[in-house]
Amino acid sequence: MLNPLACTVCHLSFACLLTIRPSGASKPLAAHHRLGSANKVFSSTSRGKSGGNRRLTVVHNHTRVKAMQTQSWQYPTPLYFESKTKHTATVILHHGLGDTANGWSSFAPMLQMKLPHVKFVFPTAPTRPITLNGGMRMTGWFDILSLDKLKMQEDKAGLEDALRNLESLVQAEVAHGIPSKRILIAGFSQGGAVSLLMLRSHMQVAAVLGMSTWLPLADEQPLISAENQNTPVLMCHGNADQVVSYAYGQESLQRLKAAGAPIDFKTYRGLGHSLDPKEVEDITSFIMKHVSST
């Protein structure tokens, strides 16, 4: 049976996340973000005033490259927002289950006002059956069998495939003259899990940011490669998260601490599986600190 909670809450665009909990609110407002809603901007379907469906298409001014294929999964073309000045750093950000690159693309223009030297890369996950949602096909970096057993039943092959694809994106930036230690890796929810896997890579990165997420393959050592032993990590999590349990975030923190990671964990009281303005402020500061112009 389709799990409506997983289907609706993981698909959150960055623009919509900013409106979920206004500054000063005692708890987050209700948010109903469905797959195929107007928040999904590749070729989304929404309900018109007459009740009929209408198609929405948004075209961004970005560089396109050929779609990549890793193993059996087809990875769509990422969105690339080129730097406004000389390109000296890159941020790669992975979306959550059921979303696309466009869901977070408004993040780039906002940050580029302060970080004009940074290029932003927003990959889109392959479309695959998701066991949690009764086998429904949707964008996902890997399969999820159960929200209650994220640590017990993991799609190892899918996770490793997603990491290989991420490493290929990093390698592409290196080929364009950006050292890997000037590339920051970020992700929300399922995308955050992929981002934390980058700590195992033999390519040193600038920093890793995980939002509303957990550490996958936590029982498989090493959690952190020698190259990323000193890579800063920030995890952000609402303590009212009804999708990825806050306890999973806390457990991930302890695992990474024990492995020696220089990690910071920020808690947002009353926040569910989303972001609020304070978290956006924190992640903006983190990104600015670790891919500054100097």
Image (cartoon, rainbow, N blue to C red):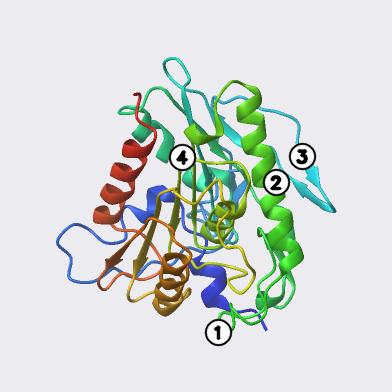
Q: CA distance from mark 3 to mark 4?
A: 24 Å
Q: CA distance from mark 4 to mark 2?
A: 18 Å
Q: Earlier in the sequence, mark 3 or mark 4?
A: 3
**Which mark lies nearer to you, 1 or 4?**
4
Q: Is residue 112 above or below residue 208?
A: above
Residue wearing tag 3: 68
Q: Earlier in the sequence, mark 1 or mark 2?
A: 1
Rate crowding at label 4 as few (under 14), some (14 to 19) or many (20 or more) other CA atoms within 10 Å: many
Which sits earlier in the primary sequence, circle 1 or circle 4?
Answer: 1
Callout 3–callout 2 Cβ contact below 8 Å:
yes
Q: Residue 116 versus residue 205: which sits nearer the camera?
A: 205
Give the camera-side residue of 220 and 213. 220
Q: Quadrant of residue 24?
A: bottom left
Report the residue at 60% width, 55% height from top.
Answer: 200
In the visual, does 101 lie left or right of 235? Answer: right
Residue 59 showing in the rendered view: no
Of badges 1 and 2, nearer the viewer stands 2
Q: Which mark is residue 165?
A: 2
Mark sitting earlier along the chain (3/2): 3
Residue at which label 1 appears: 148
